[in-house]
Image (cartoon, helix red, strand yellow):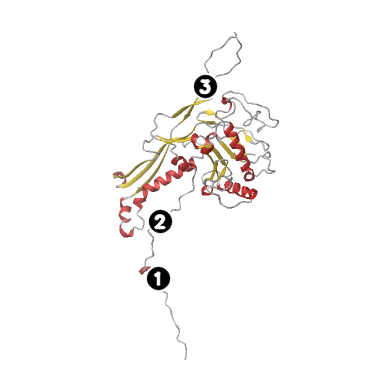
Amino acid sequence: MADIPLHITDLAKELAVTTIPKWLKKVEDQTLRGSYFFNKLLDGGRVVKGESGSELVWNMKVRLPEVTPFANHGNIEYAPTEKHEIMRLPWRAYVATESMSMLDQEINKGPQAIVRLFNDKANDLRNAMQQNLQGECYKSGSSSGRTDRYHGLETGLDEGTVTSADRVAAPNGSYAQQSTVLQANGGFWSSDMGTPNNVSIGTDWPDGNGDPDYDCNSPILINTSSTNWGTGSTDHRTNLFRAISQAQIWLKLLGSINAPKGLCVLDGWSFQGLRESQEAKLRMIQPAKSNTDIGLVGSQGAVYLDGLEIQPDFWCPHSTGYIFSMDRVSLHSLFSEGVFRSKGPIELATMAFSTIWALFTTGNIRFRSMKGFAKLYPYA
């Protein structure tokens, strides 16, 4: 008996016009990033609301009265001491906008609207603004092309002379209209070390001791690729642990860091290199309890070193880290209601009754001074 051939007609075209796809109402948001510094700034009560005035101004005390020997029946000289320097930052502002035409609103409604675009406008503006500020926290507000931006960390961290043998680079910039160069406001520093941390500086700083006006606005710029870390390597990630440990000592002795509030942020590549380096040394890979300080793995993947919290941050520049106390940072806003001010939805007759939204922020990030900040980077 002969087989009867079986013919299957391709129904793809008919199915395409008679069957609708399964649409999920939930939108998978792939725009979020892992930021730590900015979120800690917001959550830590470090936002100052309702600011006013033409600019942000504060005084920095840089020196104390001079102390001199005194002999009985000797002459005593009386003179006032100029103790303060003025710090100034301008206000900066950002805006994010959205719109939707009247016809688009009519199209995007009812059961056919898988996603109600109108409802997402305000939330999307807030997320966009927040992500922008997360990145601005790290960037300069005075470099070329960025003179209308917030004054982030890099504003006062310009480096001068540094060689491969130097453990630190010489500060050579300005912040809040005050120089970050050592001894810009006078002062003395010891010169007792056989090999200084930077030959061009010519003193023991940041080791040694001296006057407060010598480094009153100077950050510590740590050269992680120096040949003098004692590791036998010039690799940035290999030397990170030792550089962070040394930075803690320098910052503490210079009176600039409060360990319980201390924070070190690294880019992800540097952070993973630090973890791998410590795992290899300690031969230890199991996670630790979040309240245990063993210099390895801690809360939510952080690393802790002598109480200093070390965290990765998406927005931190490559091969870079920063160490500082959160109590030396604040976010200032001209708005009394908080960091952001929203406007909308507003219908505009001039735009054929389209609806517009806008979100604003205006203010600046303030660091008390660049003293108390350390940057980790392979300078040379």
Q: Residue furthest bottom?
A: 1
Q: Which mark is residue 83?
A: 3
- The amino acid sitting under disc 3 is Lys
Look at 30% across and 54% down and name the residue there: 106
Q: Which residue is mark 1?
A: 13
- The amino acid sitting under disc 2 is Val
Q: Which residue is mark 2?
A: 27
- The amino acid sitting under disc 1 is Lys
221 vs 81: above or below = below
Q: Nearer the viewer, mark 3 or mark 2?
A: 3
Q: Which mark is residue 273?
A: none
Does residue 66 appear left or right of residue 112 in this picture?
Answer: right
Look at 60% across and 46% down and name the residue there: 274
**Residue 358 occupies quadrant:** top left
C-alpha distance separating marks 2 and 1: 29 Å
Q: Residue furthest top?
A: 73
